Amino acid sequence: MPHLTKHDFADLFGATADRLPDKCLRMIAEGDWSYEPLKGRERDRVIIDLLQRIEERKLTTVSNEDKSRWLAGWGENLKAFREQGGSVDALVPKYIREGQPVRLFGEFVQTNNPQFELRWYEIFRRWFFETNLSGFENIFEFGCGSGFNVAELAQLYPKAKVYGLDWAQPSVDIVNELRSRKGLNVEGRNFDFFHPDKSLDIPPGSAVFTIGALEQTGTNWGAFLEFLLAKKPQRVFHIEPVYEWYDEDNLVDYTAIKAHAVRNFWRGFPPRLRELESAGRLRILHTKRAYFGSLVLEGYSQIIWAPQ
């Protein structure tokens, strides 16, 4: 079976293998990265099943003012976190599903390891944190969800103050319990992308990031973007599925395009950034399509920018 090498990981990240952190190289060496591209009727069945789910509206959709799904979902993580005595393993987001085919280099593939996506993401996250967030004294994750990323980041950089912000109270509780239970230098706060809290202090030189959070704002991300432009953090990082970067002539990408449309996922953001860059309000520093993702979408593309 083919398998991902360290060079494949680097290519997917937008790096080179010699620039991957030692921890990432060890994780790659220790993992099972074998996969088999789906072909023929097997590939057809995966695509047909996914398109039927999309057509029948069986995928969850974005609803701007409805917190119920997030209260329930992150509430499950909070409950497990408490029951397991503060174990970070309890914070793995439930949307990372085991055993399903994944998207890789524009195709659907079946992996030998049922936790392929989770383990890939853990390596990607470690690379992203070490490459981009070293040296910041204040780091803000907006839409921190289960606290999975906040916990990892706070352990990696114990001297940094890490803020986890989310509109669902269980998320805020998880972050604050990471501080009280594990002594991490973190703080949880409520924050609503659609109605940003303008009183929130973002000190000069701060870093801001989102991972799989802005996808939920559909086309109503304007208030948050203006909030960031006004607060002027040093760097803004988005790890999100980017609708505009799919290839509509690729059948696998086409399923993601349809899923984005049905779920009312994030759209219009990259073109707006380019407009704002032309107007001198920000600089786009880096963009990279992921070419890796879940069965439904490609969720790990990168956009990095800085307010002017």
Image: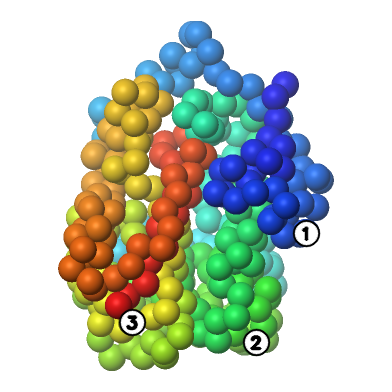
**Looking at the picture, which amino acid does disc 1 mark?**
Asp
Percent of width and height locating residue 191: 33, 77
Residue marked by disc 2: 159
Q: Quadrant of residue 3?
A: top right
Locate the C terminus by quadrant. Answer: bottom left
Neighbourhood count class around disc 1 (C-alpha, 10 Å): few under 14, some 14–19, many 20 upward: few
Query: Disc 1 vs disc 2: which is toward the camera?
Result: 1
Percent of width and height locating residue 143: 40, 67
Mark 1 and 2 residues: CB-CB less than 8 Å, in contact?
no
Residue marked by disc 1: 22
Residue at 59% from the left image edge and 42% from the top image edge: 11
Query: Disc 2 vs disc 3: which is toward the camera?
Result: 3
**In this image, 35 relative to 38: left or right?**
right
Q: CA distance from mark 1 to mark 2?
A: 21 Å
Residue 143 visible to an observer of this rendering: no
Residue 100 visible to an observer of this rendering: yes
**Looking at the picture, which amino acid does disc 2 mark?**
Lys
Residue marked by disc 3: 232
Locate the N terminus by quadrant. Answer: top right
